[in-house]
Image (cartoon, helix red, strand yellow):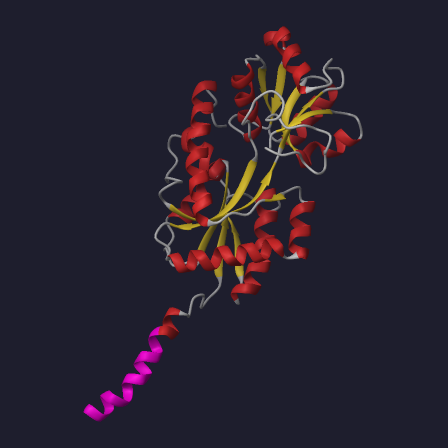
Amino acid sequence: MSRRLVLSLPFAAAAVPARAQAWPAKPLRLVVPYPAGGSTDVLARALAAEMGEGLGQQVVVDNKPGGAGNVGSEIGAKAAPDGYTLTMGNNSTHATNQTLIPATPFDAAKDFAPIGLATTVTHVLVVHPDVPAKTIQEFVTWAKAEGDKLSYASTGNGSASNLAMELFKGATGIQAVHVPYRGSAPAVQDLLGGQVKCSFQTLPSVLAQIRAGKLRALAVSALKRNANLPDVPTVDETVVKGFQADAWFGLFAPAGTPAEIIARLNAEMMKALKDPATAEVIVKAGFDITPSNPAELGDFVKVEIVKWAKVVKDSGAKAE
């Protein structure tokens, strides 16, 4: 018995690191809380393909839409913290929904382990060409004179488009009547027709119209200018210091996921974002690549929850 025990010790010792290094031993699931084909899904699939190569296991995208992103996000939050279920979260699921939807079934700051911010998409303040304002400063002056005769389009009640304008209104003191639409396409259509005069829209949804001269871009919501519109200033550098209202997208795991797994996932995400072919797909889809480490994303989420909670409460915004 003693001899068998002694002979087995080297094998037992070797088995411990083997088990510790086994992750991932099976495919991973990446929950996307929106339908296939949308911007969040496009980003998730680009990352999944490249990260799967680095991990040596397939990363399967699992679309779970519903509840303004809450259905899929709850699945991700309540999954086993073993590194096999990830969630593609964004500014809605992990910030605004926390206040906008009181029955949100998870705490974005406590129920997830952040892996890293991946991308952002800037909003751009656009106006109909009939608006007599060539700059953002002129627009604020004109809008104040218009008062509640001015209307603005958004992509829906409680949407990022809606809240970006409400943040801008609160910071500048302008008044504007909210006209919600079901998505960017009908909102932009009425903006082009002059039924509404202004809107914050994501850059990909209005870039073609800006280039064609059908809409006038006055400012972007990011803290730096966008390469697609280098002559368009930021709100931050013109009328509201510190103004930022980007849409953002990041990877999350369930709270309690081992730190070494989080670190590996972050490293693979970083590699994927640096891959030329993957980056080309992401940038062409309208994203800015803005990666972060887990701690940075965790801190960012906490700030975003507080920031947008105030905007939601002050504006009285309601989810559709």
Picture quarter containing residue 216? Answer: top right
| x and y percentages locating residue 149 in the rendered image | 62, 8
Secondary structure mostly seen in the magenta stretch = helix
Is 253 situated above or below 312? below
Q: Residue furthest right?
A: 212
| x and y percentages locating residue 292 in the rendered image | 51, 47
| x and y percentages locating residue 255 in the rendered image | 36, 49
- Magenta residues (range): 1-16
Assess whether residue 10 is covered by the magenta stretch.
Answer: yes
40 or 35, which lies in front? 40
Picture quarter containing residue 108? Answer: top left
Give the residue displayed 37% in from the left and 33% down from the top. Answer: 103
276 or 161, which lies in front? 276
Residue 288: in sight, yes or no?
Answer: yes
Q: Quadrant of the N terminus?
A: bottom left
Give the residue displayed 43% in from the left and 66% down from the top. Answer: 23
> In the picture provided, is 80 more to the left or to the right than 311?
left
Is 224 situated above or below 192? below
